Image (cartoon, rainbow, N blue to C red):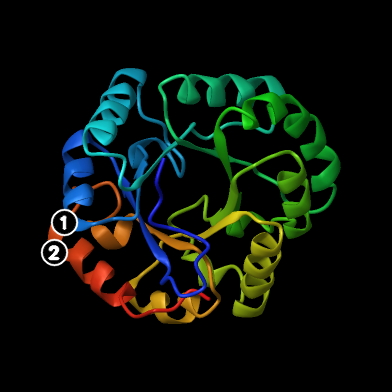
Amino acid sequence: MTLHVTLSPTARPGLLASVATLAEMEVALSAGADIVDLKNPAEGALGAWAEAPLKAAVARWRAAGCVTGLSATVGDQPLDAATILAAARRTAATGMPLVKIGFPLPLPGAGAALAPVLDALRSLARETRLIAVLFADQDPDLSTIAQFAEAGFHGVMLDTADKAAGGLLAHLGVERLAGFVAEARAAGLLTGLAGSLKLQDIAPLAALKPHYLGFRGALCATGRTSALDPARLARVREELKGRVAA
């Protein structure tokens, strides 16, 4: 798999565009999204696609030459090893290159709660690029980054679980976000920031040097559950141009 989002010291932050349908995937591919992220916003923060369209998306991505990243969420799951492993395996079995898994890890005791889940995922992490998603509006324990790296995860990102409760910057300040990005990058993890991001969030967040910024609502005409708007996607893409990620 070839990713436009790299560890290059001169790269701008990549654009992760979350799409809800195969038609929206075509829009994102045409617009030059760096990662096309398959998500069902009607089913929650990390709502999952069904198996058949996931397989169709992988086939389309391969036919396009794998020139972007392709990711998919496994659905909003409880912090239970068997449940998360089963959901991740279902998604990985479709051939999905990047599998995003949400971890509701509020303080305190996050590390101990996370350990058995990561133990269950270790073998899958050797076969599939797993991306951990932590939720900024759940007071996450960011010290768990090292555990994800040690378990073989490919990346880690921040998002928000409750899309009605404000965006990423409403929950975590710039200083804490900078620490998250720096620690994740130092651990060799692909690092992203998302969570109801708007155009005006791009400049301050790009300055923190994430590998990519993730968008859904800002790309849609009337909210995150409405259709992707090519003009809005183009505006976000244009705003990202010239932003230096490192």
Task: Tell me the number on the disc at residue 231.
Answer: 2
Circles 2 and 1, Cβ within 8 Å, touching? The answer is: yes
Q: CA distance from mark 2 to mark 1?
A: 5 Å
Residue 185 horizontal/vertical position (percent): 64, 63
Q: Residues within 10 Å of mark 2 (few under 14, many from 20)?
A: few
Q: Is residue 40 left or right of residue 90?
A: left
- The image shows residue 62 at horizontal and vertical percentages of 28, 32
Callout 2: helix, strand or loop? helix
Q: Nearer the viewer, residue 49 or 152?
A: 152
Under circle 1, the secondary element is: loop
Q: Amino acid at mark 2?
A: Ala
The answer to whether any part of residue 133 appears in the image is no
Q: Nearer the viewer, residue 37 or 221?
A: 37
Q: Residues within 10 Å of mark 1 (few under 14, many from 20)?
A: some
User: Residue at point 66% right, 79% down?
Assistant: 175
The answer to whether residue 8 is left or right of residue 196 is right
- Indicate the amino acid at tag 1: Asp
**Residue 215, can we see it?**
yes
Q: Compared to 101, does 214 lie above or below?
A: below
Q: Is residue 118 left or right of residue 127?
A: right
What residue is disc 1 on? 229
